[in-house]
Each structure stands twice: as C-alpha cells, then as structure tokens.
Image (cartoon, helix red, strand yellow):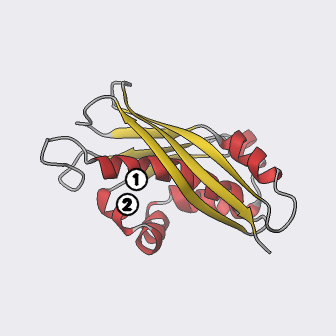
Amino acid sequence: MNAKQTDALNEKQEAFQKAMLTSMKFWWFLLWNLPSVLFWGIKITQLDEKSCEVTLPYSYRTKNPFRSIYFAAITGAAELASGALCLLHLQGSQRFSTLVTGVEGTFLKKATHKITFSCKEGDKIKAAKASLAKTGDFTSLSLKVEGKNPEGELVARFSILWSFKLKE
C-alpha cells in the first residue's frame, strides 16, 4: 500500500484497513462475524481503495474427500475478497445495508495449493456508493473475483452481486 492510495481514505477507513491487515484484530473480526472463515484459515494480504487480496490455504480444514479445496471454502474466500473491499468503502460514511443477492462461480482447475483471490473493483464500489443520494435509495453491483494458484493459473472465477441501500 502506498501513500497515494492511503491519502484517499478517511480515518475510519484507515482504521478498518489496519485492523483487517493486523492478525489479531482480523482474528477477532472473524470470530464475531465469520467464524467459519476463521476455521478455514483465510487471510487478507492486501486491502486498499482499489483492491483486496485474500489467501485460502490448502489444509485439512479446507480439504474435501477428492483431495482439493472444498467449493464452499473457495466461495467464502471469494466473497470475503469482495466484501472486505465493500466494507472498506462504507467505513465512515452514511449508514448502508449490504447484502449478497447472487453468486456465480466457475471452477476451472482443481485447487490443490494455496489460492489467492483478488477483487480489483474498488472504483466500481465507490461509484455505486456515490450514486445513492437519499434514504431508501438502493443499487446493485456485480463484483468480479479471481482465484489463482501459486503458479498464477486461474482456478476459479466469481461474479458476486452486492446490494447497497442507504439507511437513515
């Protein structure tokens, strides 16, 4: 993360960013909000205004009987990559209600190593948030997430549909 990207964030966004990138604070966040993700060993390795990167290990906690990563863990990691980016953008602004309203996933290769998921749609989230002017306004946006193995091969591709509603 460079200074140019950090300058665009407000104080609450910077605090959220720091918490998500700090092991112990992230652990507590997961314990209270997403305990299954905590069990899987997912980590946020990069988070800024434009993108989020999440890693999912290949371990006994994520494995299925076919010696690959369980599809639910893969989907959860993809959702977290887009969701953390959404949460970053919503920190310190008006109150929003957010909800995943759709998920489309394509599994292209067997996941037998650590997978890194990237969502690079921060600008899209920022524009959607700016489009909501008054209480009750809502919008939906589809965020693309890609999961790659250590060799850089595409393992899974997701389109996660998020709904945002401006609250009082």
- Give the structural element (helix, strand or loop) at label 1: helix
- Quarter of the image with the C terminus is bottom right
Looking at the picture, which amino acid does disc 1 mark?
Gly
Q: Which residue in the protein does label 1 denote? A: 76
Residue type beneath disc 2: Val
Q: Position of residue 14 (x, y in %)?
A: 68, 58
For the residues labelled 2 and 1, the Cα–Cα distance comes to 7 Å
Who is closer to the viewer here, 20 or 120? Answer: 120
Residue 119 position by quadrant: top right
Q: Residue at x 43, y 67 (%)?
A: 34
Name the disc covering residue 153, or none: none
Rendered position, 45 above or below 28? above
Q: Residue at x 56, y 62 (%)?
A: 19
Q: Which of the labelled discs sits on residue 37, or is there none?
A: 2
The residue sitting at the right extreme is 133
Q: Provide residue 20's location: percent of width, then percent of height.
A: 53, 59
Rendering quarter of residue 68: top left
User: The residue tagged with tag 2: helix, strand or loop?
Assistant: helix
Task: Name the side, left or right, on which 18 lies relative to 45.
Answer: right
**2 or 1: mark nearer the eye:** 1
